[in-house]
Amino acid sequence: MSEPRIWTPDEVRIVAAALYGSSWQTPLAKAIEADSGRPFPQNRIAKWYMESGGRGIPEWLQPRLTALFIYLYGITEDERQRALEIIAEH
């Protein structure tokens, strides 16, 4: 069995921006906090993107990110579909 891929900061940015828009760091931090039950301030995410001394994404968070994105995309797609149905009814 192969090891799961490691999320890079750029991959997280792309996926999270697709979910939350351009101001994605704060809602992602809140989602991680809700999922993990640990405080997770937005500035921890910002540190992944510092040019010098940037920190990688923590190992404990790697599998949670995958599960969280799968979950959020499922909900987002359902909500999108329901919104389209409502719009079509009008």
Image (cartoon, rainbow, N blue to C red):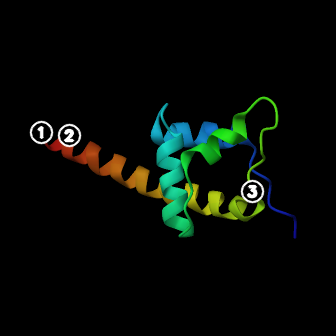
Q: Which quadrant of the view contains residue 39?
A: bottom right
Mark 2 secondary-structure assignment: helix
Q: Which quadrant of the view contains residue 55?
A: top right
Q: Label 2 vs label 1: CA separation?
A: 5 Å
Q: Residue at x 48, y 34 (%)?
A: 23
Tell whether 52 sits left or right of 37: right
In this figure, which residue is indicated by the disc labeled 1? Answer: 90
Instruction: Tell me the amino acid under the disc marked 2.
Output: Ile
Q: Label 1 vs label 3: CA separation?
A: 47 Å
Mark 3 secondary-structure assignment: loop
Q: Label 2 vs label 3: CA separation?
A: 41 Å
- Judge whether 48 appears above or below 70 on screen: above
Instruction: Tell me the amino acid under the disc marked 1.
Output: His
Q: Nearer the viewer, residue 55 or 27?
A: 55
- Judge whether 80 appears above or below 74 on screen: above
Instruction: State yes or no: discs 2 and 1 in contact (Cβ < 8 Å).
Output: yes
Tell whether 26 sits left or right of 54: left
Tell whether 47 sits left or right of 79: right
Q: Residue at x 71, y 41 (%)?
A: 48
Q: How far across and how far down the image is residue 50, in percent?
A: 73, 33
In this figure, which residue is indicated by the disc labeled 2? Answer: 87
Q: Which quadrant of the view contains residue 11?
A: top right
In this figure, which residue is indicated by the disc labeled 3? Answer: 58
